[in-house]
């Protein structure tokens, strides 16, 4: 009879666990539903998304160079963008965009990333952090909140996949040799980025292994697992490895300069990152999670639980240290080191703060457990509910509701009208954009002289700079932005500043622009797509051909022809 009651109790607990887990899974799926229901009328992030990556996938797939050699180029962009600039063909998100329309590929990526983020954080908490059966609701709630964070879309599982990887590696460290751990380590490199997440995770894990080996007997299986996963990433990212180690042509990254902040500004940036986070790893922890972690820290201090809650306070220290490292990577004190070792400028080592989403949400879970043990479950329930509300309010359909929809941003019908008006094969001429992102023209099949890419030939940057030199000289910030980075190889105009989205509701006009259109013409440039009227177009050898509008578009496009100079 006792065994019978025990089985009923266990079955009841199991059903409760499954209901909680199913609830979390359903919420994650519903979160991705708008992309499939709204389609191209969905809103989504523009920065480092619509203005770049989504157009990149389309250009790459249509270029015929998806599997091109490491020396191949893509003529549609800057008269021959290196194929390697678009990354590996073994990335899962590239294949989603190759197989599905862009909006649905985007929605599928959102769904897959959040599902595995949920599973990974839940598994990590359950197996290695909070093992009590009665804390199931904390595990599910924190895992769900983590999965709903507004991650950088093209990063895929680069940050949200870290808990799943850590779960597998800690299993191996604990002696678990089951196949599931190695399946995780094998598949993650196909749906995440090495340089935008897992380089920092794996290097941190190697450091963990060294410390662990010093404190106790070294785990050889863990070391081999780390080597295996690193080798897989290097194989998947072979284009990046080739560009970084074997390419001899200087790129725009060679002029990247990061060490310019004063001590005071570095300290200020430390606390800004610690409190508010970063756009590429938005942890949305400021309102709820941060106060909760400090309340738990107060409890640990009052009750002297330092020994029992060692992981808790260690994560507190690590969380702040990651923000400190991020901010001081830009401290001008690095200048002697970057001059001696140029690769320190070419690679952004500040991105160790990409570990913070995992750190913060594990810290959140531990904080909730501490508060629950010391005070009242109702406080914990409120904190979890409040954080989930915050996460839902950060949905793209809410945050970017005032930005153009996917359809309005890329304005395919409007740009098709422009093609038909020009009546020339698109490969026979080049265009540039003013007041809108060149990714829009690229997405619509135009060959552009301007672009936004992680790297491209330095010689091209210098050539393009001649076009905008006078405008850069008028604006110190624009000059610094282009000369010391240059990832956005745009037609910068002093009167517009660092604004690239002038919609058809804008009343902005350009009155004093000075471009070297002779150079632009010599590069193959024949047309300018401007989102604002150019009053002194004639002085810049530009002739207004026609103005294009479309009800589905966010833009008014002024089509200017670049006239041949008499001295050319």
Image: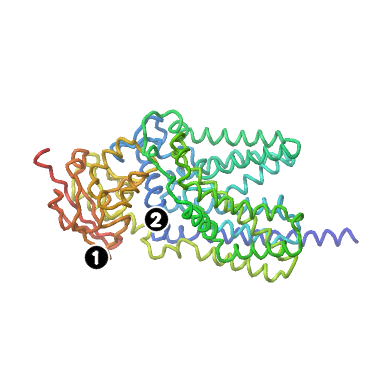
Residues at marks 1 and 2, CA–CA distance in whole angstroms: 22 Å
Residue count near mark 2 (Cα–Cα under 10 Å), binned few <14, some 14–19, many ≥20? some
**Residue 151 visible in the snapshot:** no
Residue appearing at x 50%, y 41% in the figure:
195
* Image position of 107 (left or right of 474): right
**SS of the residue under disc 2:** helix
> Which residue is under mark 2?
46
* Image position of 211 (left or right of 154): right
* On-image quarter of the C terminus: top left
**Residue 260 visible in the snapshot:** yes
Return the x and y of residue 101 as percentages of the image width and height.
41, 50
Return the x and y of residue 416 as percentages of the image width and height.
26, 51
Tell which circle, 1 or 2, labels the residue nearer the N-terminal end. 2
Is 332 drawn above or below residue 548 in the view shown?
above
Residue appearing at x 20%, y 40% in the figure:
519
Which mark is on residue 507?
1
Residue appearing at x 26%, y 50% in the figure:
433
């Amino acid at each position: 009879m006792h065994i019978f009651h025990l089985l009923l109790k266990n079955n009841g607990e199991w059903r409760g666990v499954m209901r909680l887990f199913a609830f979390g899974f359903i919420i994650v799926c519903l979160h991705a539903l708008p992309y499939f229901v709204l389609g191209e009328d969905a809103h989504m992030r523009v920065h480092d998304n619509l203005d770049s990556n989504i157009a990149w996938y389309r250009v790459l797939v249509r270029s015929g160079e998806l599997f091109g050699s490491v020396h191949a180029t893509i003529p549609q962009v800057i008269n021959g963008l290196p194929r390697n600039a678009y990354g590996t063909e073994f990335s899962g998100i590239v294949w989603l965009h190759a197989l599905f329309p862009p909006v649905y590929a985007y929605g599928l990526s959102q769904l897959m990333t959040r599902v595995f983020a949920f599973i990974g954080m839940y598994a990590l908490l359950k197996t290695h952090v909070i093992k009590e059966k009665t804390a199931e609701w904390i595990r599910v709630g924190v895992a769900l909140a983590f999965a709903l964070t507004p991650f950088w879309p093209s990063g895929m599982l680069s940050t949200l996949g870290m808990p799943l990887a850590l779960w597998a590696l800690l299993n191996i460290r604990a002696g678990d040799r089951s196949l599931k751990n190695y399946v995780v380590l094998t598949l993650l490199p196909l749906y995440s980025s090495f340089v935008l997440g897992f380089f920092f995770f794996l290097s941190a894990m190697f450091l963990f292994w060294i410390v662990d080996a010093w404190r106790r007997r070294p785990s050889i299986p863990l070391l081999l697992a780390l080597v295996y996963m690193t080798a897989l990433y290097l194989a998947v990212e072979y284009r990046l490895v080739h560009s970084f180690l074997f390419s001899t042509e200087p790129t725009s990254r060679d002029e990247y300069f990061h060490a310019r902040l004063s001590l005071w500004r570095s300290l200020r940036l430390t606390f800004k990152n610690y409190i508010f986070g970063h756009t590429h790893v938005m942890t949305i922890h400021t309102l709820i999670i941060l106060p909760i972690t400090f309340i738990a820290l107060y409890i640990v201090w009052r009750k002297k639980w330092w020994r029992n809650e060692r992981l808790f306070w260690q994560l507190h220290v690590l969380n702040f240290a990651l923000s400190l490292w991020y901010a001081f990577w830009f401290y001008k004190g690095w200048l002697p080191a970057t001059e001696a070792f140029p690769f320190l400028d070419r690679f952004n080592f500040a991105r160790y703060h990409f570990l913070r989403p995992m750190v913060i949400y594990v810290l959140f879970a531990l904080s909730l457990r501490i508060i629950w043990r010391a005070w009242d479950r109702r406080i914990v329930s409120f904190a979890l509910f409040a954080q989930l509300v915050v996460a839902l309010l950060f949905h793209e359909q809410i945050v970017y509701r005032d930005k153009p929809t996917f359809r309005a941003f890329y304005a395919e019908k409007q740009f098709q009208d422009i093609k038909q008006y020009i009546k020339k094969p698109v490969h026979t001429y080049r265009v540039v954009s003013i007041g809108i992102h060149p990714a829009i023209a690229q997405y619509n099949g135009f060959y552009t002289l301007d672009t936004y890419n992680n790297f491209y030939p330095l010689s091209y940057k210098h050539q393009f700079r001649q076009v905008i030199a006078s405008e850069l000289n008028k604006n110190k910030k624009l000059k610094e932005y282009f000369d010391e980075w240059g990832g956005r190889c745009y037609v910068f105009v002093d009167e517009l500043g660092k604004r690239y989205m002038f919609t058809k509701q804008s009343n902005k006009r350009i009155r004093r622009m000075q471009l070297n259109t002779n150079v632009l013409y010599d590069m193959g440039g024949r047309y300018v797509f401007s989102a604002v009227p150019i009053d002194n177009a004639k002085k810049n050898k530009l002739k207004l051909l026609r103005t294009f509008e479309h009800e589905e578009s966010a833009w008014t496009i002024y089509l200017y022809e670049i006239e041949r100079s008499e001295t050319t």
